[in-house]
Image (cartoon, rainbow, N blue to C red):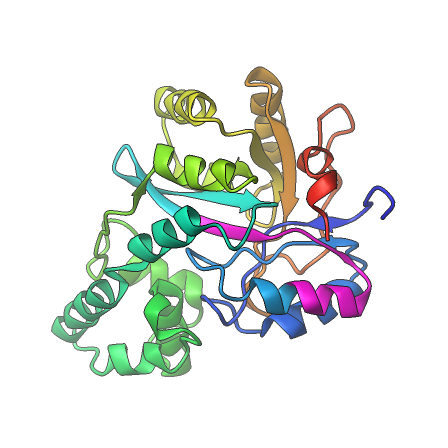
Amino acid sequence: MTFPLNPDLHSHSTVSDGMLAPEQLAARARTNGVDLWALTDHDEISGQARARAAAREQGIGYLTGVEISVTFADVTVHIVGLGFNADDAQLTAGLAATRNGRDARARAISQRLQELGISGAYEGALRYAGNPALIGRAHFARHLVETGVCRDATEVFRKYLADGKPAYVPHQWAKLGDAVRWITRAGGTAVIAHPARYNFTPAAEDALFTEFKTHGGQGVEVVTGSHTAAEARLYAGMAREFDLAASRGSDFHAPKESPCDLGQLAPLPPDLTPVWALLTGRIQ
């Protein structure tokens, strides 16, 4: 294919915590002018074959994708993997291990909500989980909005589910080095997802980028749905400082819920190396 003009390399389907099936996402991407797409469900790659087939049907390029949850400095950080072999045994086993414990965490969240006077949250959240093994906070947020407990997902997280709030339950995810190695040994490229969301101190952020590079990470999301223009400029500078390729992805989950739709992102700064330039041989 020709060099892509409108890649969107971060999105979620009903396989994890999105609201649209992979086929619906591919159609929406094509309608919105996306010419290179990746489905990056949380800790799960079982939707990759469907996404690849749907992208082919829509006539757009496709890169395999995943978003892996890791624990770094007691903070949950997300690492996106792109362009890997989805049949790699080590990657598949690592993701399965990472998924373990989500149900127990969800039940603990439900118990805390029960103690706050909100009953039936586990069962309500499960209704939104297309894959029950990946039930998570986004599913609880949708239930609490639907039942009128909160106006929107932002309020849910601010009141109940964000770190430090009364229904937050931590989970020990994969180690940073393990996640990067799973991706790279499967032939893919590892990317730090939406770095502005972690609220690290400058020293902790420097440590994250340094360790990520040491383990073989090659990219960082510069333009993403949760970054402001100022944050995009900041992480463009970090990409230059650490000699990382730049990625671009909406982090789309659902219509009317996500801050940015598929394909509706600003372009990358022209002096950065786009991550897809490292993966031209892996585009399907």
Q: Position of residue 156 (x, y in %)?
A: 35, 65
Q: Where is residue 187 in the image (x, y as percent from the top left)?
A: 56, 39
Q: Where is residue 151 in the image (x, y as percent from the top left)?
A: 42, 72
The part of the image, by quadrant, that contains residue 174 is top left
What residue is rendered at 40% in x and 65% in y?
A: 138
The part of the image, by quadrant, that contains residue 35 is bottom right
Which of 226/148 is in front? 226
What residue is rendered at 64% in x and 33% in y?
A: 246
Q: Is residue 64 magenta?
A: yes
What residue is rendered at 50% in x and 72% in y?
A: 14
The part of the image, by quadrant, that contains residue 31 is bottom right
Q: What stretch is highlighted in magenta?
A: 52-68
The answer to whether 6 is drawn above or below residue 103 in the figure is above
Which of 50/150 is in front? 50
Q: Does the magenta stretch include residue 54?
A: yes
Q: Residue furthest left?
A: 115
